[in-house]
Amino acid sequence: MVGPHGGTSDAGRPRAGAAAARRSGGAAGEPALVLVAHGTRSRAGERTLRALAESVRRLRPGCRVELGFLELSSPLLADLLPSIAGPVVVVPLLLAGGYHAYVDLPHVLARVRPDAMPAGRLGPHRLLTSALTRGLARAGLRSTDAVVLAAAGTSDPAGLADVRQAAHLLALRLSRPVTAAFASAGTPTLAEAMDRLRSGPAARVAIASYLLAPGYFHDRLAAAGADLLSPPLGPDPYLAALVWSRFDEALTAASRPTARAAHG
């Protein structure tokens, strides 16, 4: 269960040693958490990712939480990881599989922190479904609207399958069909999905943004002509809880090396 570590004294002051724990790692020797995002040229996108890191940090105030990037933004993960002493869990802020999940990130870890414990990518997951549902509701979703789950896209078939599975989970939650579509690589393209749904019976089409932060791809979604568009997932509490779930899963997997070797 996701919950705070550390805490405060009866007088409401941080417990002694909390600041030292943040500097050196986590509370009671817990590993530091390093979030890694792709990186963006959008300042609004960077602010959103830093707000997500802060949302994650608030859930376990005794644990050190850092944010790094694979490219474009600072600090780069390759520079950040060597500066952190002690055990580290790396949680990729990636909603689906693809080059960054399978090649780019493992290469950086092997080169600069082979001892780091890698966690799984974020999606698909029911907590993401909850965040998407809340975003659509706040955007004004109606029961009669057609829904598109729009992602950036990837040339990797497994990554496309992850997005389609996320669309399936959202369809179950909303009790209506949800079309997975892609702003770049992948089919159907967002334009194809919009054209098909515009010719259908629904009076309105809603796009659920399957993106973490504003930037180039969210601008593409905004230009697609939908009747409503949910915001990027950003610092949603469900997303912050999912980060800690992936962190805990990585720790559990790392604690069972014998079992992993046996299943080889």
Image (tube, helix red, strand yellow):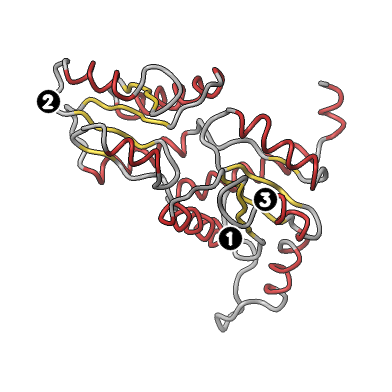
Rendered residue at 60%/65% (across/down) = 61
Q: Which mark is residue 4?
A: 1
Q: Residue at x 42, y 27 (%)?
A: 184
Circle 3 packing at 10 Å, graded few (<14), some (14-19), many (20+), is many
> Counting residues from the N terminus, which is met first, the one under dot 1 or under dot 2?
1
- Number of the front mark, 3 or 2: 3
CA–CA distance between discs 3 and 1? 26 Å
Q: Quadrant of residue 173?
A: top left
User: How many marks on residues?
Assistant: 3
* CA–CA distance in space, label 3 to label 2: 46 Å
Q: Which residue is mark 3?
A: 77
Q: Are marks 1 and 2 in contact (CB under 8 Å)?
A: no
Disc 3 to disc 1: CB gap under 8 Å: no
The disc at residue 62 is: none
Q: Amino acid at mark 2?
A: Ala
- Which residue was labeled with disc 2? 203
257 with respect to 104 (left or right): right
**Residue in the picture at 36% in, 21% down:** 189
Image position, residue 4 (x, y; %): 58, 60
Q: Secondary structure at mark 3?
A: helix
| Front residue of this view, candidates 32 and 220 | 220
